[in-house]
Image (cartoon, coloured by chain):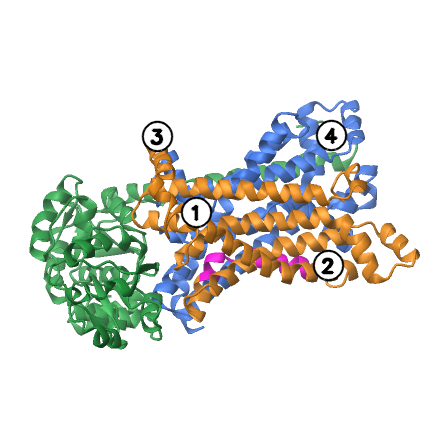
Amino acid sequence: MTPQSSSPRTRWRPAAFAAVASTALFALTACGGGSDPLADKNDDASGGSSDTVTVGSADFPESQIVAELYAGVLRDAGVKVETKPGIGAREAYVGAVKDGSVDVVPDYSGNLLLFADKKAEAASSGEIMKALPDALKSQDLSVLDASKAEDKDALVVTQATADKYGLKTVADLSSSCGELVMAGPPEFQERSYGTSGLKQKYDCSFKSFQPINDGGGPLTVQALTKGDAQVADIFTTTPAIQDEKLVVLEDPKNNFIAQQVLPLTAPDRLPKEAVDALNQFSPKLTTQDLIDLNRKVSGDEQQNPADAAKQWLADHGYDKAS
Amino acid sequence: MSLFAEAAQFLTDPAHWTGATGIPQRLLEHVGYSVLTMAIALVIAVPLGLWVGHTGRGGGVVVGLAGALRSLPTLGLLTLFTLLMGLGLMPPILALVLLAIPPILSGTYSGIAAVSPALVDAARAMGMTESQTLFRVEIPVALPVILGGIRNAALQVLATVTIVAYINLGGLGRYLIDGLAVRDYSRMLAAVVLVAVLALAADAVLALAQRLVTSPGLRSTGDRP
Amino acid sequence: MNWLTNNWPAVLELAGAHLMQSVVPVVIGLLISVPLARLAAGNRWLRPLFVTGSSLLYTIPSLTLFVVLPLILGTRITAVSNVIVALTLYVIAILVRSCVDAFESLDRDVLQAATAMGYKPARRFFGVELPLAVPVMIAGLRVATVSNISMVSVGAVIGIQSLGTLFTDGLRRSIVAEIVVGIVATVVIAVVLDQLLRLLGHTMTRWQRTGTAAPHASARRRDDTGDGADTGGARGAAGALATVESGGASA
């Protein structure tokens, strides 16, 4: 652009900056599409949803395992499958199902209902499955058949605590609640089944609450076994409940609503053979299966979710799953 | 916009200003963790920075070390230490200490190292011992830069202490993590305001300290070597 | 490192996402910061506004920014674009400050010489000011890049995939190796990018070191305070560090 100047110096400077600027612009344009993968995948899905089913999952291990099970079951039924694991929290994967970037994702009946309808009061598995289709319809979402497998919140104590206070059900806690520290995920303090639910239904207010953000994982269990807390909200499929011989307190007043595992999808999104395959699969999955699978992906065994799922599928006659 | 109104409501609700989960308690915890972190980091980083800056030995190592520490993800350290050491105060504090060390260390080192060699030689020529040279000449001259590093570290720590709530500690991060867990954005916004106000106040105090300790002889020439 | 051998495809994918989320903001931030800094340099009104504004920005924890931005931008809370925008803001906060310093420390004689030689303002900016500001800019870029790489992982707390996912997932699954892999991968990416930037700065400022190409006083002066890792030894490096140390990250 500039006339050839006398010194080589003055020539290369703008050239170097032009190079940097163009690299920068290239990087910008190259990554522009990548910065919003959801929008990106949208086109892809609308074009290909008829023959390829995209199975997504939330960003925690159990959801990834069940997603791998779904994917294997669909492959076994001759459906072309892609997986998109670890999309994120419910807002994220529900959004992904809505905008078509994901066709099916595992979810839990109770929490899904509360997500779709904050005021829902259904608690038993039957009530929830009855209320769910209507609550989802307005959002253009749908669910397939629910499995027996369930992963719900539960109050858990060590055997020693259970013996000391004579605990079998949550109701037995009412006299000793005030002396006990509870640990659980932060949202427990505010959900209807949480602190307020315990107080209403069981007249139980704990001395204090320790919020721990590992989804009822190793730290929550550790808080319990080390005595930092005496009661913890731990999901019922956590292997540590069996491994550490913890006691799950019964919930006679249905404070903790049912959480059956089920596929979340959108109406008419899945081909018929996919719907049939998933509906045949769901009754086969049990809560104990989830516990065993969770054990395989955590702690010492540390398999990845796909391998753990593969084993289950092979054991249950899905020969063409991979 | 109603979100901002809700956040303001959260901040002005008298119920949020008392008790174990109230704002004063959370503020106190937040400041407490920050002060503890800074105290440990200062004890480690300042003497090391002084020594390296004064002797000139290992300057490259310090620059490299500070850079490497800076790239350590605090969330990773937090989860790692907690998994290895269990719940408690120290695992998160240790993760924060590693965050605070780089700015303090490189501030101290670069402040001392950038003191004019002529000045140091003059001090020695006047018969000052090595420690006199360090404490009477180098440190006073380098103090603004040293404090600059400390100020940066303090601001980073105050902002980052929020993530210790990801495990089970308190602090203003509780409002963030708890708010996130139930998607209560107004509470999170209120937390942002509180952290920002706290950080600004801390910054003002540290800036004042920095100004007060700057030797009058340095002011006319600017505070940067 | 059994865990890594079994999971390296997933780690690679997360590393790719991580790299994208940390590098794109640096590039966008650079393109925004340079003109901003040039405007602010020596300007009585803009300079304090930008410099105070950028230090204020640093008090906002990245986690909050990740969450508050979608409310302002109208994006979905888990969209990657939130991380990109948030980190771009941090990059601007670092770079505007160091670029303002860089432009203000330019030797007036050199600028006047350029004008006297008939350089129009635009050509003087691209041909003289910008190249002379490179050492300080590169130092700022290095700080911004490294702190970005460490901050990206915080997005995992709200479910945005990056190497940080290995931290939250490793915690839930109680797998120490997974977290360690995440930390090591993050540091490796940071070190590699940092060295690439150092090399870039080295290449772009070759004229400062070749005797024939550095005739004016300013070049010699820069050698004292500039990227001394290559030229001036430890004391020069210390000077550059002291200038840039105002940066850093709030994770």
Q: Estimate the spatial distance between the alpha carbons at disc 2 and disc 1, rounded to whole Å.
A: 37 Å
Q: Estimate the spatial distance between the alpha carbons at disc 2 and disc 4, rounded to whole Å.
A: 51 Å
Using the rendered image, report if marks 2 and 1 lie on a common chain: yes
Give the quarter of the image for residue A171. bottom left
Pick whichever of labels 2 and 3 is earlier in the sequence.
3
Q: Are marks 2 and 4 in contact (CB under 8 Å)?
A: no
- The label shown at residue B24 is 1
Membership of B70 in magenta stretch: yes
Q: Amino acid at mark 3?
A: Met
Pick whichever of labels 2 and 1 is earlier in the sequence.
1
- The label shown at residue B50 is 2
- The label shown at residue A254 is none
- Chain A drawn in what color? green
Using the rendered image, report if marks 1 and 4 lie on a common chain: no
Above or below for B139 versus C179: above
Q: Estimate the spatial distance between the alpha carbons at disc 3 and disc 4, rounded to whole Å.
A: 57 Å
Q: Which residues are magenta?
A: B60-78
- Chain C drawn in what color? blue
Q: Are marks 2 and 3 in contact (CB under 8 Å)?
A: no
Estimate the x, y position of residue B68 in percent, counting from the top left: 59, 59
Query: Are there few (<14), some (14-19), or many (20+) residues within 10 Å of tag 4?
Result: few
* Residue sitting at x 70%, y 47%: B145
Q: Which chain is orange?
A: B
Estimate the x, y position of residue C106 in percent, counting from the top left: 74, 34
Estimate the x, y position of residue A319 in percent, counting from the top left: 18, 70
